[in-house]
Image: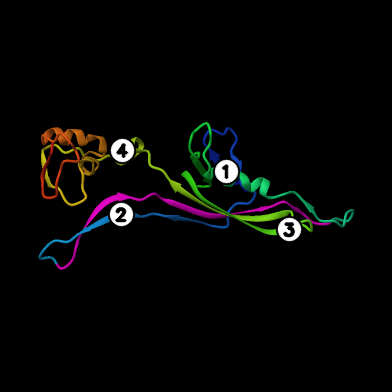
Amino acid sequence: MGIKKAKLLIEDVAEPLEVMFNPESYNLAFSASYSEKKIVGLDGPVSQFIAGESQILNMTLFFDTYKPPTITSQEEGGTDVTKITKELAALVLIKGSLHRPPKVTFKWGGLQFTGVVTNVKQTCTMFLADGMPVRAKVDITFKSILDVETSKLTSPFESPDRTKVRILHEGEQLWNYAWEEYGDPEQWRLIAKANGIMNPLDVVPGQVIKLPPL
């Protein structure tokens, strides 16, 4: 079996962008956000899960268009490597047809990471006598994006089968509870109706909130 090149599948582009050399390594980062609430009488704060953070994929890709001297020609050659690397740099720019940067899927072996490119750093490392860059490395960062509907299907929240009661804390809003209980922040309207709340911003810390069953 031959070596398979890593590919970038770019939204709204028919042909995938194949890397010149597979990365030597890549780094995947996972994290979650928690808030800390100080409770009188406890030795330390109580941690409450808020939400998962976006996954981050980092790697360095190498590009080489240099042509060394041959027996028939003693001159070095090559093409401008930035003509290739600019395709990666374009992934952080707004695409006219989408009105935003495109979604990108990096696919290589068992890794299939879908998100957006948030950072591209290019370093040219070799030049011809006239200054043309013929070798470069590109540090690229991908950030995952969450599809709420897909997320609810793969990790569904349990729908409460009875009314629950919560005490509103500082900085919390109805949509926080809607996401926590139902997996859908839009369900804040259901909570507002159950509590006779006309304006979702018209709530105060310490207020008792009922969370009705769906």
Q: Which mark is residue 152?
A: 4
Q: Position of residue 204 (x, y in %)?
A: 14, 47
Screen quadrant of the C terminus: top left
| Amino acid found under the numbered disc labelled 4 | Lys
**Which residue in the protein does label 1 denote?**
90
Q: What distance separates the C-alpha of mark 2 from that of mark 4?
A: 19 Å
Q: Position of residue 178 (x, y in %)?
A: 22, 40
Q: Which mark is residue 33?
A: 2
Using residue 59 as the reference point, say whether residue 56 is left or right of it. left
Which of label 4 and label 1 is nearer to you? 1
Q: Does 55 lie within the magenta span?
A: yes
- In the displayed structure, 112 sits above or below 69; it is above
Q: Earlier in the sequence, mark 3 or mark 2?
A: 2
- Give the residues in magenta: 43-69
Q: Earlier in the sequence, mark 1 or mark 2?
A: 2
Dominant SS in magenta: strand
| Amino acid found under the numbered disc labelled 3 | Phe
Q: Which mark is residue 127?
A: 3
Q: What distance separates the C-alpha of mark 3 from that of mark 2?
A: 45 Å
Residue drawn at (23%, 44%) of the image: 176
Single out the residue that lies furthest toward the right. Answer: 72
